Structures are given as C-alpha cells and as structure tokens.
Image: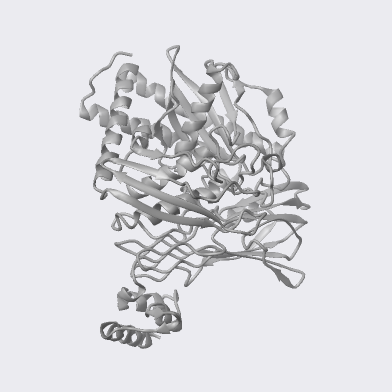
C-alpha cells in the first residue's frame, strides 16, 4: 500500500480505535464464555497482528500481558507453516486453532484462535485470541499435572488446523477435541465465545477502515510502531549504562525436589537492553520448563511493568534483545512438560528482571510481587447434578513495595489481569463451599514500604469424590524484598482429610490427591516483598497497620527493628526511632 502521511490527531484517533477493537473483543469473549475462568476471571486476551510478519499491532487493555508476545510468536509460526506448505493457506472465514507449546505457545490449556481478516476481498491483518480452557485432557483434571515428565501427560496437543473453514465449524476436528477432554459438552460454549470475539473485532475493524481507508490505517500502524520504539528507547536511555545482575528461583519442578535458578544479566547500552539468562538451571524433568515464546514474553511484560506508559506493539519490543537461553529450562523442547511455564515460571523470569534492574532504577522498579497464579484444580463427579466437573481456581497475592508506597494487597498475578472468580459463582457451579476467603495478615514483607498482603481461603467438598491438583510456587522462599526490604511470606497449601493435615512434599505442587465430602483445602498465597530498610518505615504507618490488625504489636516490634545475626544491634538514632515506634504501638494496643 502507498505510504500516507498521517496527521497527529488522526494518528491518535486510529491508535485508540485499534485499541478499542481489541478491548471490545476482550469484553465480548468474557461476556459470552461459559467457563468461570474466562467469564469471571478473564483468563484470556485478544489482539491484532500483521498480515505478513505476525508482529503485534495492538492488544486489548483487559487481556493478560503474558499473551502479548505469545500470540505474536504463535501467529509467526502459523505464517511459517503456511509458507512451508505444512498448514493450509488462509481463506476468508477461516479460523485456525492451536495450542502447541512449541509453536509460540504456553501450556496446553491456553488455546489460541487466529483468524485472517479480509477487507474488501484483500487480507489486511490477523485477529487472534487466547483463552484458558478448564481442561484439555491429560493425566489429571485441568491439565496442571505437577508430576508430568512428558507433554503428552499434560493433555491434547493441537498444531495449527482450521477449526472454522469459510465460516463453518469443522465437526470432525471438533469431535476429535471433544473426545479427548473432560466435560466436553461444556467446551462448545467457550469455543463459540472465542470465535464470536474475533467476529466482533472484524466488525469494528471494518468500521475503522471504512472511515479512514486501509492505506491511512496501514500508515498509522507504521507510525504507531515507530513512536512506541522511540518512547521505549527514551526510557532505556535514562538508565545508566552498565551490567546489572539478578536472580530468582522456582521451588522445584514437581518431580525433583530441588530449586531451579533463573540467572538474569541485563546489559544497558544507550537505548538498548540485552538480556542474558546463561547460567540458569538445565532442562528439568517436571512441568516447570518454559517454552521460548513464554520466556521472551515474560521479559517483555517485566519491562512493560517498569514502563507502563509505552503502548503495547512490536515497536516497544525492538530495543529489547534477548540471548536465547539454549540448554536451560527456559528453552523447552519437545517432549519436555510445560504446564507450569506460563502461570509460574514466567513470573520468576519477571522477578529476575526486577531483581536486576532495581539496582539501576530503584525509583521505577518494585520489590517482587507474589509471583504465583495459585493454580488449584479440583476434578470429580457431582452426584446432585449427575455430571462431572473441573473447577479451576486462580488467586492473587501481594505486590511488592516501591519507592512511593506500600504494595497492593490481593493483586492479580504478575502476568496479567486475571482475578479470582467470585466465590458465589464458584459455589453455584461446583459442589464446594468457601469456608473462608480473607486477607492474609502479616504476609507482606517488612520494609520502608512494606509488601502487600496475600489472601487465605478454605474450600470444603460438599458432594461426591474428587481429585485435587496444585501447580503453584514461592512455597520454599517468599517474594524477594528490595534495597534492604524483607521477603514476603511464602505460599502454603494444606489438605485436611480424615482428621489429618497433609502438606505436599513439594510444598505447593502435587496432583491426584483424593478428597471427599467434608475434606477441606486451605491455601495461603504469598505477600509481596518489602522495599527499603524496615526500620526506616514511618512509625505512624506501623501503628496504623497494627490498628487495622495487619500485624500484632510483637510482630511490628520485631520486624521493624534492626536484627543482625540474630541479635538486635542499633545505633543511637535507630534506638530513638525504635522507642518512638514501640511507644506509638503500645498507645494504640
């Protein structure tokens, strides 16, 4: 298409118009989906991608940031397979379905649709979305197999195939899918919702092109990409040149009870960032391997957290150069299991980026957030409804403190905006009762600005028999504090049955735990890391937290003092401040 110069006002309108297209797709997807994990928890995302390269043009504000890079790489893989003749070329009305982790994916439960969008008979772009399906088959309900040693144990793997051909669903492919997943009759609602979101996007994008013309919109897309790159480079240029190192740890892979290290080295040179993860742990036996698309996308979302004002498109990624982590668990190859990659490992990668860059730009980077999606799946049979069920529960945790204020409590996971579905909805759908859903007091890491608090909840089985599975993290060590701040509280999982309490050997990873009527599952999610020396915290804020019940007087006295090698050692100024803090607490107790 010929290049057209777009004036700034029109450029701003088109940029927001593209964003609105994606936002409407997000909303349509959630409002029409059947499963609570999409309809209530919003575990999905929608975007627009370049017709020839698959590069990201725009993504919805209401979608998971981790899918930013994922769907870009997935679209690129579809285009590659089409060029190689291994996948049928697109026609108007087609929708491809794919969940293969090794083809620009995450775990198998994240199912991606990609639709070629035609305007007046000519292909203009790709519309794509991702939705988390509650079940995709495999050895355990929900797909989160904590002990899987190969991807086939995690569920049905789909290469890019046309689920819709010229607007009509392929019933044979649908039958294959439904024959390999649990509660198959319920998935048709999510499939139609996912397709409907793309149709909404096509309608809105057609209206935008009708108004401005494809040539103008194409030129605007090019300008938007360039401006995002310029904006990101301006931010990076403000970071002092140098090499900054950080690290983060995954508790274990679910099979071998040893931590997995993510070694992060970030090199800043002018307006470029180079990320090197050489030195990270080798590929693991269990499902905590990360496919390369998830690894790259995790770096992108970490930088997006640090510089949230940069519009999301391929231009924002241009200054971010990543050395492929070949030979590590962050570059999983078939048949390595990967069910924990997007929900858990991705957040450790982001944490490692924060750990490195907080040394360079402490005013921009927070202490570590909770960093776990809290994946809890309960699958079984409900005798009252005479049908099977798969319940997928995700939970929030505390955000890390930062230079300006305390961390948010019960925030979404690092990778997205997904939130816990309302307990009333979950109790309506599944044979369970929430006995508790509350703030996890004292879980935020102490600091000048403390971490936010996680949550604690308790679920009781009301009817039938079921199996419980968990793929969580931060059970061994809590989220990292920054610049002298303390770590947040770690994740805790307890299963109460037959008068006994069972704690998984891998702390927050296990599968196929049988539960029945009256048994209870209790989960405590991590608090965020503290930022800055805890003893520099304003005594009035400590007193406020005690009045609100967040800390006891004893905890506040101990945690916001100065402890060295197990003994309290303070200088005169610190002693005065500590006495002031203690006196304030006693006055309010």
- In the figure, residue 274 lies in which quadrant? top left
Question: Viewer-proximal residue, 5 or 226?
Answer: 226
Quadrant showing the N terminus:
top left
Q: Position of residue 513 (x, y in %)?
A: 73, 58
- Residue 530 appears in the picture as rendered: yes
In the image: residue 497, left or right of residue 353: right
Asked if one can make out residue 308 in the rendered structure from this viewpoint, the answer is no
Give the residue at x 30% y 50%: 242
Here the colouring is: one colour
User: Does residue 146 appear to the left or right of 552 in the view shown?
Assistant: right
Viewport quadrant of the C terminus = bottom left
Name the residue: 35% across, 65% down.
Answer: 483
Total marks in image: 0
Please tell me which residue is depicted at 70% across the width and 40% down the height of the picture. Answer: 137
Above/below status of 297 relative to 542: above
Left or right: 146 in relation to 46: right
Is 314 situated above or below 263? above
Q: Reply above or below: 497 against 194.
A: below
Residue closest to the eye, 413 or 187: 413
Is 503 positioned to the left or the right of 132 in the image? Answer: right
Q: What residue sits 28% from the left and 43% below the top?
A: 269
- Residue 58 picture location, percent across and down: 39, 33
Can you name the residue that lies furthest to the top here?
121
How far across and down, in percent of the image, does residue 102 sit?
Answer: 58, 34
- Residue 207 x, y percent position in the rendering: 38, 23
């Amino acid at each position: 298409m010929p290049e057209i110069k777009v004036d700034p006002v029109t450029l701003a309108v088109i940029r927001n118009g593209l964003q609105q297209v994606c936002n409407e797709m997000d909303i349509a997807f959630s409002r029409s989906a059947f499963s609570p994990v999409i309809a209530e928890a919003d575990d999905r995302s929608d975007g627009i991608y370049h017709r020839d390269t698959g590069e990201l043009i725009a993504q919805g504000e209401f979608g998971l940031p981790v899918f930013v890079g994922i769907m870009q790489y997935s679209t690129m893989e579809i285009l590659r397979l089409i060029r190689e003749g291994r996948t049928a070329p697109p026609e108007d009305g087609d929708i491809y379905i794919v969940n293969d982790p090794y083809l620009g994916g995450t775990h198998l439960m994240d199912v991606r649709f990609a639709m070629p969008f035609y305007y007046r008979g000519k292909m203009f772009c790709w519309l794509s979305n991702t939705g988390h399906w509650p079940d995709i088959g495999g050895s355990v309900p929900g797909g989160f197999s904590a002990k899987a040693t190969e991807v086939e144990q995690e569920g049905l793997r789909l290469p890019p195939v046309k689920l819709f051909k010229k607007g009509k669903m392929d019933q044979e492919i649908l039958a294959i899918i439904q024959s390999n997943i649990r509660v198959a009759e319920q998935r048709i609602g999510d499939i139609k919702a996912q397709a409907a979101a793309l149709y909404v996007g096509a309608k809105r994008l057609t209206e935008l092109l009708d108004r401005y013309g494809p040539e103008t919109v194409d030129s605007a897309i090019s300008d938007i990409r360039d401006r995002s790159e310029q904006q990101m480079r301006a931010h990076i240029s403000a970071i002092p040149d140098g090499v900054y190192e950080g690290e983060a740890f995954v508790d274990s892979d679910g099979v071998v009870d040893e931590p997995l290290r993510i070694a992060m080295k970030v090199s800043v040179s002018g307006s470029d960032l180079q990320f090197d993860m050489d030195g990270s742990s080798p590929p693991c036996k269990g499902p905590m391997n990360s496919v390369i698309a998830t690894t790259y996308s995790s770096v992108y979302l970490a930088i997006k957290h640090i510089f949230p004002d940069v519009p999301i498109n391929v231009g924002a990624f241009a200054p971010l150069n990543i050395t492929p982590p070949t030979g590590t668990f962050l570059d999983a190859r078939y048949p390595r299991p990967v069910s924990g990659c997007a929900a858990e490992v991705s957040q450790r990668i982001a944490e490692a980026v924060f750990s490195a860059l907080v040394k360079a730009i402490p005013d921009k980077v927070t202490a570590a957030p909770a960093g776990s999606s809290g994946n809890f799946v309960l699958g079984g049979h409900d005798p009252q409804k005479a049908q099977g069920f798969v319940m997928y529960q995700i939970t929030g945790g505390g955000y890390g403190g930062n230079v300006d204020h305390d961390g948010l409590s019960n925030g979404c996971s690092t990778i997205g905006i997904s939130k816990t579905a309302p307990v009333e909805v979950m109790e309506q759908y599944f044979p369970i009762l929430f006995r508790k859903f509350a703030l996890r007091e004292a879980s935020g890491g102490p600091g000048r600005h403390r971490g936010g608090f996680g949550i604690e909840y308790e679920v009781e089985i009301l009817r039938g028999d079921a199996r419980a599975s968990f793929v969580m993290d931060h059970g061994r060590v809590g989220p990292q504090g920054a610049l002298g701040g303390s770590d947040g509280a770690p994740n805790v999982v307890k299963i109460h049955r037959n008068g006994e309490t069972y704690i998984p050997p891998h702390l927050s990873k296990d599968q196929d735990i049988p539960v029945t009527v009256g048994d209870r599952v209790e989960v405590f999610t991590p608090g965020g890391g503290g930022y800055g020396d805890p003893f520099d915290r304003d005594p009035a804020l400590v007193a406020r937290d005690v009045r609100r019940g967040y800390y006891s007087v004893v905890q506040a006295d101990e945690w916001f003092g100065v402890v060295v090698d197990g003994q309290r050692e303070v200088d005169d100024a610190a002693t005065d401040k500590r006495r002031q803090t203690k006196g304030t607490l006693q006055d309010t107790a």
